[in-house]
Amino acid sequence: MSRSPATRPSTTGLLLDLVRTAGTVSRVELVEAAGLTAGTITNVVRDLIDGGLVHEVGRARTTRGTPRRLIQINPEAGFAVGAQLDRCTTTVVLVDFAGRTQATAGLRGAGQRSPQDTLTTLAEHIDDLLSSAGIVRDRVLGVGLVTHGPQDRARGVLLTDQPSPLWREYPLASALSSALDLPVLLENDATAAAIGEQWAGDVPTATFGVIYMGSGIGGGVVVDGDVYRGRASNTIEIGHITLDQGGAPCVCGNRGCVEVTAGPAAVVAQAMRDRNLAERWSLSGSLDETLVDFERLARASARGDQDAHALLESSAQYLALAAVTLVNLFDLDTIVLAGPAFSTAGPQYRDHVARALSEHALSRELSPAKSLLSANVATAAAVGGALSVLRSSSPGERSRSAAPPPRSLSI
Amino acid sequence: MSRSPATRPSTTGLLLDLVRTAGTVSRVELVEAAGLTAGTITNVVRDLIDGGLVHEVGRARTTRGTPRRLIQINPEAGFAVGAQLDRCTTTVVLVDFAGRTQATAGLRGAGQRSPQDTLTTLAEHIDDLLSSAGIVRDRVLGVGLVTHGPQDRARGVLLTDQPSPLWREYPLASALSSALDLPVLLENDATAAAIGEQWAGDVPTATFGVIYMGSGIGGGVVVDGDVYRGRASNTIEIGHITLDQGGAPCVCGNRGCVEVTAGPAAVVAQAMRDRNLAERWSLSGSLDETLVDFERLARASARGDQDAHALLESSAQYLALAAVTLVNLFDLDTIVLAGPAFSTAGPQYRDHVARALSEHALSRELSPAKSLLSANVATAAAVGGALSVLRSSSPGERSRSAAPPPRSLSI
């Protein structure tokens, strides 16, 4: 009937996250927010202060009685890395224990390289990022490695031939963990984007969905503040809803999916069929350059190019259908568009999604769902990966002496 | 970050449900299952025994130490009614406080009647059911009124013109509450079917989806034992996924939805186009008789009629696509088919869904999703409605003296 105790977050983790979200908070406010007794809060907060994870920062004025002592996260208590890896792009972020981004780096994606080569490069870039931020390895809690799905998170492997068959079952999490001597947690890109939006975005509600568009299209859902995980986090594959049964074959084995109908690769492929358009926008047509090509096309549309505009209109209409399905199935307040493909094209997609939701979502009369463009389209997923690390660990829990090296965090 | 305290079930409700599910259980087992302290369990169980809601039933042998005292729900502590109301059928069940079905009744659906007339008839039937079961009104905790969506559960009204515009915004819950002088809780039919399956079905997992097919098609999802509710329970409108954008218009305002492509009314309408088929199977073609017609067609298919078989095959293939989408979005272990339309046609649909899930679900390599036919296709939703009442109330909480009469339970 209820979740098993093992899947409930620990009281310590819950309180740390409440303090992290609130910024500055009193014990009384924590009692109200956590639904725990004052005694429990007092004890756990004392342990957190003793462990250096939170600290007291003064007193709040109250209308009567003793002023309440306020606490904050100690941002120096630890750090986490989020690394979002895609066929076309890689984004790395470093966040402090308060969840604030300290440094970011963008580099090329996996392309045609082997997972081994890709992870070696990624590990070097993470090393560089830590060095330039002046953070020694001992202070890093772990890395959230963010990729497309389907994944087996417990084993830290992909269950797909994308971007090439070499990646299927390659021990991504443990290989990166060995390379860095840090715990590594595997996370789905769209789920991570939802976590990133929840944390660093401007979403005005605790119940929302994310449509994530990078090289592929995925979705994430947060309900009443909780990330929707399903049985094993292979959730909300919104890119693989069938829109046209007679449509083009998709890597997932079906036909006419949202991804092959509306995704960046489909838009670029359609442009490539007209040599004039491909030349006008300097498209390469290489799958490894899909997001670069798509961005060129989006900039052309933004400059008033009617042909580019028409291609994006068609894609946006299909994506809007997927957004309606997302709202009709998950009953959401808001759809947030995130991911690097929305860097320039975002507003055009957002407007289509908004119109489709207001005209076609079933529960629109109860309260129409809104459409927002993420304020961090390119980094939301990486930030979410880093947040997952913060939420699944605390500095005291990490064993540095364990051998073999720590390979994964609790998922 | 976490659910607000107000949306967490009460400790009393949680424990009652654990005892109800377990059948017979010791306090030690409750401590493990609930993740609460032994002290809390001892106190709450004492209150439950004092209130007559559970009772002790002996001791269990243990390998060492004192034998553990066992407790059970007192089935006589209260009763609940579930009433599933559809255009074509109505099903009423009476359950005791242990959740066991005591009596059932089936009657015609709402058809073309006004909500007022329909509820008057329904109230009479509920009265008759209680009388014949020998249960006085004072012992009934409330009625779970189960209908299609979208609904505004808080106000107890439908937000749709189905089955006719008279139903939109009609005060269903409060009108039935006044007619019966009982609290009434409005519940979505597919969500109720998921609750009913979770409770009375043979589902071997805590993470599953239900595809519910009555006059329409809907879905329900249970994740790790919790019913998925979204923002306001207007969830998983699987009947309104667009399969064919150029398809027939649907009552939802879109085109080519699963419901107008694969639903019972669509199957019957296609049969009606051939006068020979309509005569062979004695179809009326009236929308109010859709489920009767569909059942005749399903029986013809089961007897070996190839034309009937072909019509159902086509519908089952579309429904299987919807099942794949449900698994790809919600990441589920199992899909259960429930609802009166599966009474005879169930096995044919189940086989199609099973094949589609094994061939097309994205996470099939992690663990293939299974397809089951409910053991209670016709009553699952009504049972779920009654269970919702048991879970949202306890006998001591109901105020009999309040005026105006109690109109709704906590949702």
Image (tube, coloured by chain):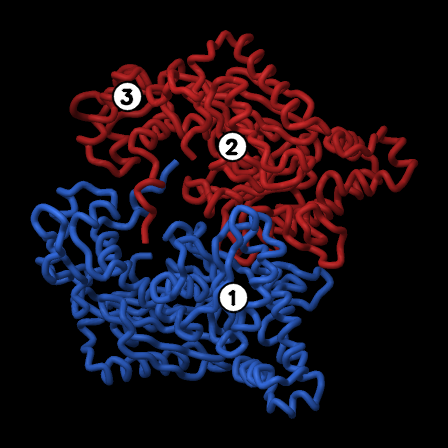
Chain colours: A red, B blue
Q: Specify the amino acid type for callout 3.
A: Leu
For the C terminus of chain B, the quadrant is bottom left
Query: Which chain does the numbered disc 3 sit on?
Result: A
Q: Which mark is residue A127?
A: none
Q: Which mark is residue A186?
A: 2
Disc 3 from disc 1: Cα separation: 51 Å
Labels 3 and 2 share a subunit: yes
Q: Earlier in the sequence, mark 3 or mark 2?
A: 3
For residue A48, which numbered disc appears in the image?
3
Chain assignment, label 1: B
Tag nearer the camera, 1 or 2: 2
User: Where, by quadrant of the figure, is residue A277 drawn?
Assistant: top right
Of A100 and B207, nearer the camera is: B207
Q: Which residue is mark 1?
A: B160
Residue lying at 32% horizontally and 82% vertically, measured from the top left: B125
Secondary element type, mark 1: loop
Q: Residues within 10 Å of mark 3 (few under 14, many from 20)?
A: some
Give me the residue at 78% from left, 35% from top: A301
Cβ atoms at labels 1 and 2 below 8 Å apart: no
Instruction: Please give the chain letter of the residue carrying mark 2.
Output: A
